[in-house]
Image (tube, grey):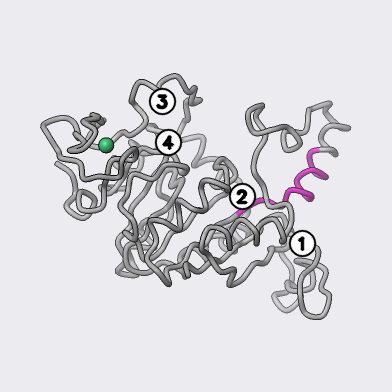
Amino acid sequence: MLEGLLEEKIVCPDCRRKIRLEEECLICLCCGRKYPLCSGIPDFLASQEERTLSWKSADPLSYEKDLESIPYWRLRRIDRPLIDSAFGDVLEIGCGTCRLAAQIEGKKANFFGLDPMPEYLAFAKQKRGQKKLVRAKGEKLPFADASFDTVISGFYAFRYIDPAIGLPEARRVLKKGGRFTLEMLNHWLLNMIEYKNRIKYGAKPQNTLPREAGGHYDFKNFPELRRLAEGSGFRIEKIYSCPVSPVFPHLNRYLSGCYLRGKMIVYLGLDVIIELRAV
Ligand SMILES: [Zn+2]
């Protein structure tokens, strides 16, 4: 059985028509495609075409361990904007093990999680009791238009999603006036760190590679982001970077970037928080 609220919002990701739940699978009433339920979680990636894509397997325990290795002050700084923006029906794109779900539900919001990794979703279901989960890609959301009040994408999940496709998709499932808060890594700073590692360990800097070769989509510059966000039907409400080390709060503003006439022109922090409004 699917959670009622989830069943209400789900559509076929191909034709965006209603799908019907039948025993152990979901069937599209229009194109007839079938999507299995894996441990009760709708799986939109198990179809023939998607099976050819290679998804590296993920270990939820080492994912949680990676998170624990991040200093508390940094995690708090990147989590806070996501939790604060959550209102009404909230979709997290790239929810991983649903780390933020309990805090979001504590605000009387309805949490929905989407991730391509079945291992993370199974963990979220078993250990965190999450029910409103789907396995899908951020570029192809299996939800009806204007289904959510808030969309979030935390812990750099959006660096695995092509923003030229992922941003219009996020806008499509959002109601007008809804917010989309996402976190990206600062491309330039990341490159500097990676080059340092390259000199030190001889490792190849991943961030300079194309996405197909293991590179990532990261925050490169404001004009590019504005073009993509505004072209997708968003207005940029706020964009800021968090400083890379814990400092006195009143100094944070000056350590997060270089300003010109009150506008940040160079982002110095590693974490970039982007707050968008659906217009
Ligand atoms: Zn269909």
Q: Position of residue 262 (x, y in %)?
A: 77, 79
Asked whether the residues under the numbered discs 4 and 1 touch, taking CB atoms below 8 Å apart as contact, a structural biologist would say: no
Residue 112: percent from left, percent from top: 33, 53
Q: Residue at x 65, y 59 (%)?
A: 227
In this rendering, which labeled residue sits more in front, label 1 or label 2?
1
Magenta-drawn stretch contains 109: no
SS at mark 4 in the image: loop
Which corner quadrant of the image does residue 230 belong to? Answer: bottom right
The residue to which callout 2 is attached is 70
Q: Which residue carries the number 3 mark?
A: 50
**N-term mark: 4 or 1:** 4
Q: Nearer the viewer, mark 3 or mark 4?
A: 3
**Which residues lie in the magenta part?**
184-194
Residue 36, disc: none
Marks 3 and 4, Cα distance to the nearest angstrom?
11 Å
Horizontal and vertical percent position of residue 68: 55, 47
Quarter of the image for residue 44 reads top left
Give me the C-alpha separation between circle 3 and circle 1. Answer: 37 Å
Q: CA distance from mark 2 to mark 4?
A: 23 Å
Q: Is residue 198 left or right of residue 219?
A: right
Is ligand 1 within 8 Å of the beta carbon of the residue shown at mark 2?
A: no
- From the top left corner, tell me how far across and down residue 187 is, in percent: 73, 48
Image quadrant, ligand 1:
top left
Q: Nearer the viewer, mark 3 or mark 2?
A: 3
Element type at mark 2: loop
Amino acid marked by disc 1: Tyr
| Tally of marks | 4
Task: Decide which of tag 2 and tag 4 comes sooner along the chain.
Answer: 2
